[in-house]
Amino acid sequence: MSETSTQDVSRVLVTGGAGYVGSHAAKALRAAGFEPVTLDDLSTGHEWAVKYGPLVRGSIADQALVARVIEEQRIDAVMHFAASAYVRESLLVPEKYFRNNVAGTVALLEACLASKRIRAFVLSSTCAV
């Protein structure tokens, strides 16, 4: 992954795109002329929130799925919003948060790097909004 210009990117994978921040990012991408493709397991997101491009149901931890989506959808960039973000729950079930936020993100990054297609990767915590 290296520096890129917006002219080099047309299709963007939005992980967590069925959630609040991800769905608004997809809307902004569409308005800017990009094609958002949402990857979401719908554990906290909503299918009805995906309005600006296709929805692929699945986990960021599923490297084979991510690799297939990148290839089949011709993904050029990724915006990653699929982190678990409930503070109280993270204290009660920390292993769930480690599995998704750390191991899941590593799996997503590995699939992106292996594809050799991804020119830009944006990592964002919805907690920072």
Image (spheres, rainbow, N blue to C red):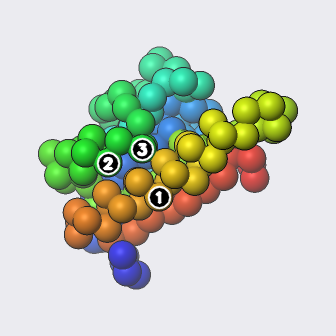
Front residue of 60/25: it is 60
Helix, strand or loop at label 1? It is: helix
**Residue 28 can be seen, yes or no:** no
| Residue position for label 3 | 61
| Residue position for label 1 | 106
User: x, y percentage for residue 110?
Assistant: 36, 62
* Mark 3 residue type: Ala
**Residue 87 can be seen, yes or no:** yes
Is residue 104 shown above or below 43? below
Which badge, 3 or 1, comes first in the chain's sequence?
3
Q: 88 left or right of 124?
A: right
Residue found farthest to the bottom: 3
- Are dots 3 and 2 in contact, CB under 8 Å? yes
Within 10 Å of the Cα at label 2, are there few (<14), some (14-19), or many (20+) other Cα atoms?
some
Quadrant for residue 20, please give it: top right
Helix, strand or loop at label 3? It is: loop
User: x, y percentage for residue 101?
Assistant: 59, 48
Is residue 28 shown above or below 39? below
* Mark 2 residue type: Gln
Residue depicted at 32% across the width and 31% down the height:
56
| Residue position for label 2 | 63
